[in-house]
Amino acid sequence: MSIDSQSAPHVALSDRAVTLSLANPRLYAFALVLAVVPLWLGEYLPLVDLPGHLAIITALKEFLAGNAAFTSEFAVKWYEPYLTGLGLVYALSLILPITVAAKIVVSLSLILIPIATGALLRESGADERWKWLAIPGMYSFAFYWGFLSYMVAIPIGIWLLVQTIRFDRAPSLRGGLCIAAIALFAFFSHIIAMGFACLCALAYIAAARYTDLRGLALRALPYTAPLPLIALWFASKTGSVVAQDAPYVYGSLADRFLLLINQSAGLDSVTPLAAVLTIAIVTLPPLCGARLSRRPERWLPFVVGLIAFFAIPSFAFLTGYLYERLGAFLVPLWLMLWNAPRERSRFEWIAMPLVLLWVAANTWRFASFGHETRSFDTVAAGMEPGKRVAAFVVDNGTSWFSTPVYLHFVSWYQAKTGGVVDFNFGDFQSVLLRPNLGAPHVTELLAWRPWFFDWTLHGGSRYDYFVVKSEADVTELIFKDHVASVELVAREGSWWLFRNAARTVDPSSSH
């Protein structure tokens, strides 16, 4: 391993002899397990887009099983750079309930982020013990928004940088092929994560080999492997989709600074706890005697990543939340800057109670949300399986999270029963299963603004059920002059279930 001079390897040896130490692997493993415990405290995860992705997986299973209701209405688009996460959940859902399959994949993808960070610190010569500070950031912006494919791609991207350091240190044909394979794997996991990871990897090589242009070019060659696939993917894109009604938005600098605070702290909003955690992540290494590396290859990936975070827009290329996703990589890149101190600090243990405090806060929030969602189960029980449902979520928030966690929540019905819920993620251009967009249906605009629903324009007669989430009675606001076309079946909490009155005679009709 190549490390900076005077990085004090004897410190690591002394740490191993101390039970209550950041270098204790058993304590670290225990902390990683605790970090994902909140995910298992309720039936549903409070991740905004996750139910929409799982609904597509269930629909794909029905399509491949030959269900005529799906084969006649949907078409599969196999060539998409978002296959890994969906494929893992799909495979597990063949033997497990899809809610359990999703939790397993999400849990593993989260745990692998600090594990990969530890490998990154070890390979770069940084102080590996600070991998503890990467635990909160595993709950990234992409996590809270339920970007399943991107969550799975984050540790793959970090691992690409780990392999880059090994390849730069000892270049070989086998190492180059390994880099190319990981880059291709990252492409099929998520193109944005792949692009950012390759950018940081090339920054590392450029900083390490800027005096050797031939060596730099040879080491950079494996990263060109995904380029033909990227060109083919762009060429195959047809049609268009607007992300939250905004094809191009840069976003304010203030929002970016605030996101850096809650992203590093693994929280979804800026709170006193988020501020404390982020300050600790930034200051604990130097306060505990860690020294900044003088090697440019340790610095440039972080600098380039930070520039990208502040330069890339929020919405562009018909894709939403671009720069926001990149924050998941910044803490590992920051920790890579620090060498181990010459002597063990008496304050480094602070990292452990901070992580435990973060876990406790999330445990309370996730458990409370799980209790809150029981009212949805009561309403969902009033719907027959396999029906077409229109979702009108007027109140999409909760007091436990700052994100609109209920925005696509009704899609859990599709994920669990095999029906179809609109708005459907199949409307997005980058999704595997695409519906017949020519038929009138509830669109993404209505997911955000359900009061714009028009019975004729959006095909109200096609739906068996209508699920409304609102604290107040908004029946007339939603259905307008077609109030008589629906009948209230159940209400629990803020959930309202209506049935299409014209379809009660023939309840087997759907799709």
Image (cartoon, helix red, strand yellow):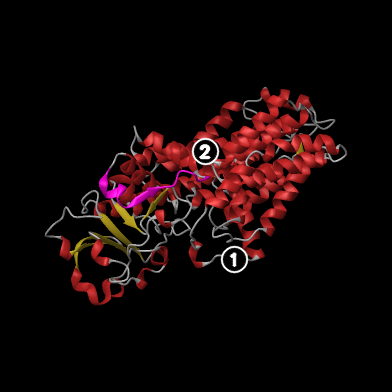
Which region of the structure is painted magenta? 67-81
Q: Mark 1 belongs to which amino acid? A: Val
For this orientation, the residue located farthest to the bottom is: 481
Sequence order check, earlier mark of 1 and 2: 2
Disc ID at residue 158: none
Write the residue at 79% across / 38% down: 217
Q: Which residue is mark 1?
A: 249
* Side (left or right) of 232 relative to 77: right
Q: Which structural element holds mark 2? A: helix
**Per the image, is 76 magenta?**
yes
Q: Which is more toward the observer, 377 or 361?
A: 377
Q: Which residue is mark 2?
A: 109
Q: Which is more toward the observer, 228 or 209?
A: 228
Q: Which structural element holds mark 1? A: loop
Quarter of image, res 471: bottom left
Q: In the rendered image of this protein, does residue 220 appear above or below residue 437?
A: above
Quarter of image, res 258: bottom right
Local crowd size for mark 1, using a 10 Å CA cut-off: few (<14), some (14–19), many (≥20): few
Image quadrant where one finds the N terminus: top right
Q: In the rendered image of this protein, does residue 141 appear above or below residue 316?
A: above
* Side (left or right) of 255 relative to 416: right
Rendering coords of residue 269 (x, y %)? 55, 57
Q: Mark 2 belongs to which amino acid? A: Ser
For this orientation, the residue located farthest to the right is: 211
